[in-house]
């Protein structure tokens, strides 16, 4: 049986980490693309040479020729400039909007049937630009942010209560920024509502840390957040490759869902084979809906700012 083909566009820390995680799980043959000569080839060869030890039978190639993504079933886009200390997501717009235009054109030409996962920041604007350029249906392109944000939230809650993260069920929705929305009404630990376990004031503090989680790591490492971003791309990729139909919080294109039209925002999505991705409807409380709408409003502002940058050349 023919193996699936997964293309990673961007072989930096995030792309290579995600590719390696997919390699370890044998999800499919891997193409690692980057514009820096030697970087993708070296990382691919290093990965491939570990296959006999690990008992993995997939092919891995590294390339600076974008044509090598030809026929990919899934494209994971991590290319672009990383967020650096003191740099807001808006600062990345000028550089990364151009990158997404080039990448989207290549995917449309060489992998027109692929399911696309976008990781590049500013996430909500970059996945918007990719959809515009590719013209793909909304079920075939998502931005991966919610898994990362939700994982941070679950981590902090588990630490607070002294339990396994597996016992914590939580989602963070809305835009991928400082106004992301942890959904308390759907947050449970061992089946118990979180508000019965942690006082409101302490929950506010934990949620504030969740919103600033990316900046906290960037300040500590003086670099991009690598490991968790790699893992979040893996979760979406595994859902698509294995048709798992996992419900994951992703930046999805909303066409009336949740009262939003024509924008990407974090909502629960059923990730399966490309043709079966669907939005999972939940009922937000009035306070959560207000916060969600405010977050989406900032996404709209971000997209408008990107449009101005693009129009200015």
Image (cartoon, rainbow, N blue to C red):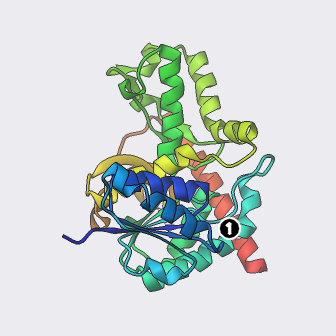
Decide: is 136 above or below 243.
Answer: below
Quarter the C terminus occupies? bottom right
The image shows residue 280 at horizontal and vertical percentages of 33, 50
Q: Residue at x 30, y 52 (%)?
A: 55
Decide: is 213 above or below 97.
Answer: above
The image shows residue 151 at horizontal and vertical percentages of 49, 36
Q: In terms of image quadrants, where is residue 136?
A: bottom left
Label 1 environment density (alpha carbons within 10 Å; few <14, some 14–19, many ≥20): many
Please name whichever residue, 183 or 226, is drawn nearer the observer in this view of the structure.
Answer: 226
Please name whichever residue, 299 or 80, is drawn nearer the observer in this view of the structure.
Answer: 80
Please name whichever residue, 205 or 63, is drawn nearer the observer in this view of the structure.
Answer: 63
Please name whichever residue, 127 or 78, is drawn nearer the observer in this view of the structure.
Answer: 78
Residue lying farthest to the left in this orientation: 1
Residue matched to label 1: 96
Q: Residue at x 52, y 32 (%)?
A: 153
Q: In terms of image quadrants, where is residue 215?
A: top right
Q: Residue at x 35, y 49 (%)?
A: 54
- Decide if residue 42 is on the left or right side of residue 154: right
- Decide if residue 245 is on the left or right side of residue 23: left
The image shows residue 26 at horizontal and vertical percentages of 32, 56
Q: In terms of image quadrants, where is residue 277?
A: bottom left
């Amino acid at each position: 049986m023919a193996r699936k083909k997964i293309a990673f566009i961007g072989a930096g820390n995030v792309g290579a980490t995600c590719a390696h995680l997919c390699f370890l799980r044998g999800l499919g043959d891997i193409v690692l693309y980057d514009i820096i000569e030697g970087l993708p080839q070296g990382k691919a060869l290093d990965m491939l040479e570990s296959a006999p030890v690990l008992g993995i039978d997939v092919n891995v190639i590294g390339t600076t020729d974008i044509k090598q993504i030809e026929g990919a079933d899934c494209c994971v886009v991590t290319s672009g400039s990383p967020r650096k200390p003191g740099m807001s997501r808006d600062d990345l717009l000028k550089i990364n909007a151009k990158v997404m235009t080039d990448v989207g054109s290549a995917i449309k030409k060489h992998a027109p049937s692929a399911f696309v996962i976008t990781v590049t920041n500013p996430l909500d604007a970059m996945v918007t630009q990719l959809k515009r350029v590719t013209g793909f249906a909304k079920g075939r392109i998502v931005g991966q942010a919610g898994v990362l944000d939700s994982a941070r939230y679950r981590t902090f809650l588990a630490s607070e209560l002294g339990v396994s993260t597996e016992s914590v069920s939580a989602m963070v929705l809305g835009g991928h920024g400082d106004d992301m929305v942890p959904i308390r009404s759907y947050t449970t630990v061992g089946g118990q509502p979180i508000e019965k376990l942690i006082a409101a004031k302490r929950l506010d503090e934990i949620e504030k840390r969740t919103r600033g989680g990316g900046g906290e790591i960037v300040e500590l490492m003086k670099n991009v957040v690598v490991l968790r971003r790699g893992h979040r791309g893996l979760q979406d990729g595994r859902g698509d490759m294995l048709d798992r139909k996992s419900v994951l919080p992703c930046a999805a294109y909303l066409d009336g869902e949740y009262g939003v039209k024509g924008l990407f925002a974090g909502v629960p999505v059923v990730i399966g084979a490309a043709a079966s991705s669907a939005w999972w409807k939940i009922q937000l409380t009035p306070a959560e809906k207000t916060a969600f709408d405010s977050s989406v409003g900032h996404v709209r502002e971000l997209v408008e700012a990107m449009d101005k940058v693009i129009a200015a050349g």
